[in-house]
Image: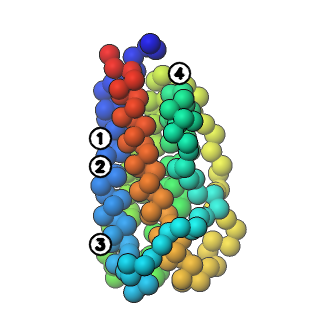
């Protein structure tokens, strides 16, 4: 069995990820409320919607199970480093599209701040274990991100909020796995 990880630190990151998972579910619901009838219809499907530069959570169970601590934490670090940029773009979009949706704008800013905190905790934890913090691209946003139509900006925000929710589910699963695997 490998050396035990600092469980208190994993527990702290886990607690933040669980909180964020709850908050992003609320963010997604609030986001949809302000985007118009097409977004509140039950028939809205996210299948096939993907943004260039936005990490996906899909990984086979076997590959996920075999990941090292460094790979697992590194993938989470890279994902949230990308999501923080996209989340800022969504915040900017919603400030322009829905300036009176104060609850939505507040949730977007709060989520952005908490994601920044999660990135810092992941980096600190990885450093404490002597792991390499992965390099991340400086600008992941596709060219032309600011010149898209209102509809495209609404879709982009939906994909970002939904993807962030899925990543937080994976992060909670990753941290649960690490906590169990490296019990003291």
* Closer to us: 14 or 1: 1
Q: Which residue is mark 2?
A: 19
Residue farthest toward the right in the current orientation of the protein: 143
Provide the secondary structure element on which disc 4 rests: loop
Where is residue 4 shown, x and y percent of the image? 39, 16
Of circles 4 and 2, the one toward us is 2
Q: Kindly identify which residue carries mark 1.
A: 15
Image coordinates for residue 36, horizontal then vertical, percent: 40, 85
Q: Residue at the spot x=34%, y=20% of the render? A: 183
Calculate the distance from the C-alpha at mark 4 to the C-alpha at mark 2: 27 Å
- Can residue 134 be seen from the camera position used here? yes
Q: Residue at x 54, y 71 (%)?
A: 156
Dividing the picture into quarters, in which one does residue 15 lie? Answer: top left
Looking at the image, residue 165 sits to the left or right of residue 50; the answer is left
**Mark 1 element type:** helix
- The image quadrant that residue 23 belongs to is bottom left
Identify the residue position indicated by label 4 in the image.
130
Is disc 2 in contact with disc 1, using a CB cutoff of under 8 Å? Answer: yes
The quarter of the rendered structure image containing the N terminus is top left
Q: Residues within 10 Å of mark 1 (few under 14, many from 20)?
A: some
Label 3 belongs to which residue? 103
**Residue positioned most to the bottom:** 37
Q: Position of residue 145 (x, y in %)?
A: 63, 71
* Residue 124 quadrant: top left
Instruction: Please rate how many residues cluster around mark 2, counting C-alpha atoms within 10 Å: few if below 14, some from 14 to 19, many from 20.
Output: few
Secondary structure at numbered mark 3 = helix
């Amino acid at each position: 069995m490998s050396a035990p990880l600092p469980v208190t630190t994993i527990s702290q990151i886990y607690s933040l990820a669980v909180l964020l998972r709850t908050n992003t579910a609320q963010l997604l619901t609030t986001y949809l409320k302000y985007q118009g009838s097409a977004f509140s219809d039950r028939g809205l499907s996210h299948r096939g919607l993907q943004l260039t530069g936005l990490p996906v959570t899909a990984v086979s169970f076997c590959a996920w199970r075999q990941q090292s601590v460094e790979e697992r934490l590194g993938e989470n670090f890279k994902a949230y480093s990308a999501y923080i940029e996209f989340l800022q773009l969504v915040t900017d979009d919603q400030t322009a599209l829905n300036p009176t949706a104060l609850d939505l704008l507040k949730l977007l800013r709060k989520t952005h701040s908490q994601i920044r905190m999660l990135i810092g905790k992941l980096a600190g934890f990885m450093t404490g274990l002597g792991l390499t913090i992965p390099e991340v691209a400086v600008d992941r946003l596709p060219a032309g991100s600011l010149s898209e139509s209102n509809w495209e900006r609404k879709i982009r925000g939906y994909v970002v909020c939904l993807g962030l929710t899925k990543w937080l589910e994976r992060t909670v699963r990753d941290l649960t796995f690490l906590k169990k695997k490296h019990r003291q």
